[in-house]
Amino acid sequence: MFRIVVNRCRRKTTVLFLLLAGILILVRNIAQRKRREEEIPTIAVLISQRGHPHIPHYISSKHLYNYTETLRIQTLRKTGVFASVNSGRAEQINIHLWFNLCGSDLRTLLYFPCFPNVPSARKLYPSLEIKNLGESYGKRVFGFIVAPESTGVLFRLKASGTAEFWLSSDKNPQNCRRILQIASPQGTDFLISDEFIELKRSNFYYFEILHKHGGSREKDFISLEWKFGEKNNFQQISAKYFHGYQDDLHIAGDVVNPKSFPLAGLKIHRKNISERAKVANEIYHREDIYQLPFFPQQLIKDLFPKCPYKPKYLIKRKLERYGSKWENIYSSLYPSDNSNVTESNGFVTFGNDVLGESEALKVVDMVKKQFVDKGLRDYELQNIINIESKHYRYLVELQFRNIKTEKSFQFSEYLYLPERSSSLCYPEGFSWNKTSMVNFLVTSGHNQARWVYHFINNMDKIYKETKDVNFNIIINDFLSPHADLKQALESSSLPNYMLLTTSGRFHKTLGLQQAANAVTDPLGIVVILDLHLDVPAYFVDDVRKHTVLGLQAYSPVLARLECGSNAVVKMGSYWEFHGYGMVGIYKKDWDKFGGMNIEEFKYKWGGEDIEMYDRILMAGYEADRKKIVGLHHYFHSKKALLVTSQ
């Protein structure tokens, strides 16, 4: 007996020893792999470009391209980016989910940038008895209803939160119309259609249910019932009367696969944010000033005399680490841009300061007087679009109309009122270039591709609205497996872009620095952008206005949206006062102050932006800070960023 016990103890000890040894070997292998990844030279390789006749040779090696492109294609195939979508199956319906969307307002889903093309998860269900899927998410349920007989049908929709039921007159989704809408979570949780809908036996009818649930998991539900004729009762639609629209389970969540997209232009998913073209003699404002042509430069180049400009607030000392955040001088604006925003807890975060009306009108009167004195009497002031003041330096933007031709122009120039002077002047060297190439730089890691896809669409929309051919986007992607960014760029209308791919572990500062290195024109502007943004169309010119060669960088302030907020649904937002991640500066000046700190900020996030801001100020540049109305940062899960950084 004693021997048996001893043998058992020995066996347990041996097993425990082997298990411990296995764990130690695994830990050692992981550590060695990480060291190897960090030792691999991370080289950015050009994958696709448009509008760039001169490409740096170090990113355009044919050998590196072939190797990297093969690796990129292999990576994308694993997640289903190129997969074909199979036909739907009988007795199933499609469900697409979007997570981390707070609130019960359906518009939170409809105006989310990744809806309807890129869901967080794809599922197939045998019925519409769907409940307890999670908290704070949006859902798209779609497929076909197969009529059991030819008759008139009433439908009853039940749902937590808000929901809509759409039904086509046949199998074509384009023929859908909304049958039922639960518009408020505080109202009834079910609705009955107000008319019998005629269905024909065995015919397929496309349907779609959009559902926004914002409460707890236990209260989450949605169902669709029907009844035939007046005397029958409502009953659940049996699985045998459903048919899936498509079989897409082999496509991973968050994957951008154009073959799985809904038909373009479906009125079910239409986002009705009004946009319209301007008509002649209409008044322009900050958000649409880019549509207004500039004054002919030869008419205004001598409108004011030039004068020395050397602001006293320039930094002439070494700052402590992160000390630049105490050196900000914000501009004040006239008229008010109504940029105060309210957080979800009800507190107001203040927007841009408002310039006093008397000071603003005094500046305008001096400009009008110069027009008269210089013989430009054919031009009359139509509107004060924007005046920005910073220590008696003004960005003056006015709308004038030629009374003979009735054409309108924008006057957009920097003016300065020197100390102990009563006359405005052009500050020497401080003017903005209206045609500078603006290069927007982004980098992406493991699971951020759907947001890069949104960024491409956002930039494409800006180009279509502004017709501005002088901006360029450069994306440096660390082999994101969830989207074919090359295909997305090549199918866009963007006149200028560059896609770089870097293998190895995601390294944010290196990715951005490599993107900046691809800009070869020292007189081009480089702008670091975050992902998860909505960028307004006027932002391209706004960057040009606030970035001055050799003198000023631009550090715009964005509004960070609370969970569930978007351009339509206001669930709270706040100005990111302490964020310095977006910076615009001329490439020549970028090289002068040193760009990103790629050694100190390798794989950790936080602090790299303000450290760079320190060096910009210590290099002798001004940095203009202004809150940008319409520049939004969407709420997203921190978990996604942690996965990317690891």
Image (cartoon, rainbow, N blue to C red):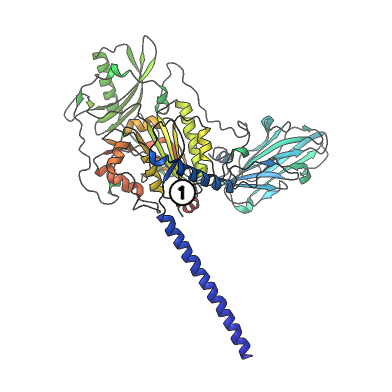
Residue that lies at the very extreme toward the bottom in this rendered image: 2
* Visible residue check, residue 564: no
Residue that lies at the very extreme toward the front in this rendered image: 63
Give, as a three-letter code, the residue at label 1.
Ser
Q: Nearer the viewer, residue 366 or 445?
A: 445
Residue 534, given in percent of the width and then of the height, sits at 46, 37
Residue at 80%, 42% in the rendered image: 233
Q: Quadrant of residue 482?
A: top right
Residue 81 horizontal side relative to residue 341, left or right: right
Residue 215, given in percent of the width and then of the height, sits at 58, 49
Residue hosting label 1: 503
**Circle 1: element type:** loop
The quarter of the picture where the N terminus appears is: bottom right
Residue at 59%, 41% in the rendered image: 257
Residue that lies at the very extreme toward the top in this rendered image: 404
Label 1 Cα neighbours within 10 Å, binned few <14 / some 14-19 / many ≥20: some
Q: Quadrant of residue 537?
A: top left
Residue 321 horizontal side relative to residue 187, left or right: left
Q: How many numbered marks have been drawn onto this rendered protein structure?
A: 1
* Visible residue check, residue 145: yes
Residue at 49%, 36% in the rendered image: 456
Q: Taking 372 as reference, is 386 above or below it?
A: below
Residue 497, given in percent of the width and then of the height, sits at 44, 34
Residue 111, given in percent of the width and then of the height, sits at 54, 37
Q: Taking 409 as reference, is 228 above or below it?
A: below
Q: Nearer the viewer, residue 276 or 543?
A: 543
Residue that lies at the very extreme toward the left in this rendered image: 420
Q: Nearer the viewer, residue 563 or 260?
A: 260
